[in-house]
Image (tube, grey):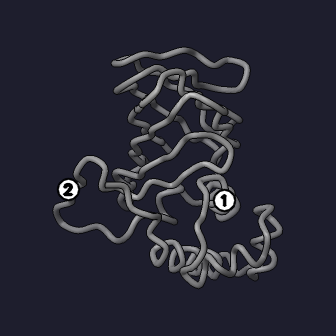
Amino acid sequence: MQRTPPLETIARALRRERERHGISLTELARRAGIAKSTLSQLESGAGNPSVETLWALAVVLDVPFSRLVDPPAEPVHVLRAGEGHAIPSEHAPFSGTLVSACPPGARRDLHVIAGEPGATREAHAHVRGTTEHLIVTAGRWLTGPVGAEVELGPGDYARFPGDQPHAYTALEPSSAAVLVMEYI
């Protein structure tokens, strides 16, 4: 069962990171290209953030995506299939589920992604130095930097720069993959 995004975790993280940068709600919203009312709702633990909104905020705040959505770590963490917090795209039949966040000192986040044929999930450039690693677990995907996408099937792996515009298109129903975001 997929649950809604962890709104309280997102609210606390956004406030913490915005205050760390010493910028106002208005300024963060402007830099991220989102409505101030949207950001205000998110910081109050309301709303239904899209993956695009959260990525835009992460880029402006210069933090990994996981820092906004992952609650504090437990000593042992088990995530059963389908129990993660799926965050949908606004523009494509695509969702991303953070599986494991980067602990202090480490530089990677682990996601499970799922998609259905239809619109392409276009991703903006992430934090400078980001590399994405994708391993297809089901279906077929067309992914990679815009203009240099590759088609992948079950068991296929691709590595590409995540700090430039890139895309994900599910080519078959019930396509799924493991995505590792690596940060320098």
Label 1 CA crowd tier, 10 Å (few <14, some 14–19, many 20+): some
- Mark found first going from the N terminus, 1 or 2: 1
Percent x, y of residue 147: 73, 19
Q: Nearer the viewer, residue 162 or 135?
A: 135
Label 2 CA crowd tier, 10 Å (few <14, some 14–19, many 20+): few
Q: Is residue 112 left or right of residue 119?
A: left
Which residue is depicted at the point 68% across and 44% down?
Answer: 91
Name which residue type carries label 1: Thr
| Secondary structure found at label 2 | loop
Whether residue 166 is situated above or below residue 50 in the rendered picture: above
Residue highlighted by disc 1: 53
Percent x, y of residue 104: 38, 61
Q: Is residue 107 left or right of residue 27?
A: left
Q: Mark number for residue 7?
A: none
Check the picture and name the quadrant holding the N terminus. bottom left
Percent x, y of residue 57: 66, 62
Residue highlighted by disc 2: 78
Q: Nearer the viewer, residue 2 or 35?
A: 2
Which residue is depicted at the point 41% across and 20% down?
Answer: 157
Q: Is residue 94 left or right of residue 111?
A: right
Specify the quadrant of the image occupied by residue 118.
top right
Name which residue type carries label 2: Val
Which residue is depicted at the point 38% across and 35% down?
Answer: 178
Report, in whole angstroms, how far the alpha carbon at label 1 lies from the one at label 2: 27 Å
